[in-house]
Image (spheres, rainbow, N blue to C red):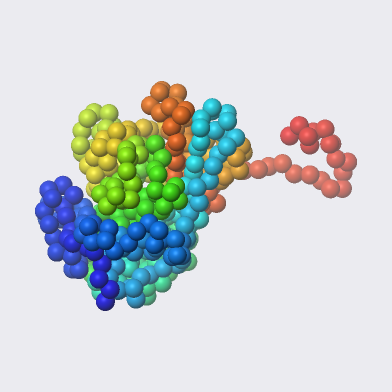
Amino acid sequence: MTDTFVSYLECGLTGDRYEPDVIHGLSDDGKPLLVRYHLDQIAAAVRPEDLRTRPNGMWRYREFLPVRDPANVVSLVETETPLVPLPRIADQLGTVEILVKDEGRLPTGSFKARGLAMAVSMAKELGIQRLAMPTNGNAGAALAAYGTKAGMETYVFCPDNTPEINVREIAMQGAKVWKVNGLINDCGKIVGAGTEPMGWFDMSTLKEPYRIEGKKTMGLELADQMGWELPDVIFYPTGGGTGLIGMWKAFNELREIGWITGDLPRMVAVQSTGCAPIVRAYDRGERFAELWEDAETIASGIRVPAAVGDFLILDAVRESGGFAIAVPDEAIVEAQTRIAGVDGLLTSPEGAATFAAYESALRSGLVSRQERVVLFNCGNGLKYPMPPMERSIDHTAPIDWKALAEA
């Protein structure tokens, strides 16, 4: 066994402490559990310069992570994801810099790989063999891949309008998958109801403590890439919000051990106007978000009508001086097309939503053109439907070159 620096688990709402190294779901109050560390011991054990000799990827930050035995790490080689500049769009907008952290380069094509790599690794360490979750697509694909890698049995339930490529991906990577005539919260009810008769562990977002720790590595990696100086503002596509919560946790841990100083980034939760429970709660000054009825958006990854970690998302947004903002699907489509057509980066709809939100925030004065921003693209754009392309050429007929040039 390799000692980690985990101290205890803590209820995110009440602060009650729970023993580590045993199986936990939610706290006794039905809220997410957060992993707490002996940060002074981490500070004494490792320095930023020590990381330079380690391979890139999420596991280079092992002192900040909960897996004790390296033999339990379940990995598909989670590489460092790049910060991709959008220079032409930045010139158009008159801004200093726009960076996109492109999480679509990870295994299974999305940032869900980070959280599920960690959650499955901890499930292996704790002796769990059967896992289940609801998903809008990418999380289920990651669970299927990492569960299969670990030799576990996985069950996945998707809303019936989940992108078909996601459903097929989940099935091909070894999970037992079903479409459900409802939304992700309806799928979650099936998972919850099956816990006893099926004997599976519920891997729903934030219903176990370790996906946050995997997603936290986005924040650790971002700080590392930027020389331990953080951007002014981070725009993050927010459904269950694990990544936003995890990054805010990472930044606070780094500041506490002295690896970063000064102000932390303002965290911006981005949603669609078709499903914006966090934005509505933020606007009302509320700490908890009400269920969003009849949720609908093309950005399926943020189509989450109710998030169990709603208060943690809202706490992070407010503590950071950030805000929550919703954009319509039309703006998401336009943003996706523009980023690809102007700067050549194909984003997911959820990633495009962050750019649409950034433009909206610029217009309203919520952010300035002098602030350095990072937009999170959470998935590979190739996994989503694209507009049809109908043009064709008959090679046996004369070619109208003028029409070709004007197309």
Q: Which residue is drawn at 18% across and 49% down?
A: 12
Q: Is residue 328 visible?
A: no
Q: In which quarter of the image is residue 122?
A: bottom left
Q: In this view, does 44 lie to the left or right of 269?
A: left
Spot occupied by residue 336 in the image (x, y as percentages of width and height) = 53, 39
Question: Relative to residue 63, is residue 324 depicted above or below?
Answer: above
Spot occupied by residue 229 in the image (x, y as percentages of width and height) = 40, 44
Q: Residue at x 45, y 41 (%)?
A: 375
Spot occupied by residue 266 in the image (x, y as percentages of width and height) = 34, 36
Q: Judge by depth and name the residue closer to the eye, 305 or 251.
A: 251
Q: In which quarter of the image is residue 54?
A: bottom left
Q: In this view, does 228 lie to the left or right of 13?
A: right
Spot occupied by residue 175 in the image (x, y as percentages of width and height) = 40, 67
**Marker count (numbered):** 0
Question: Relative to residue 248, is residue 200 depicted above or below?
Answer: below
Q: In this view, does 283 lie to the left or right of 81?
A: left
Q: Which residue is drawn at 81% across and 46% down?
A: 394
Q: Residue at x 44, y 37 (%)?
A: 373
Q: Judge by depth and name the residue closer to the eye, 159 or 150.
A: 150
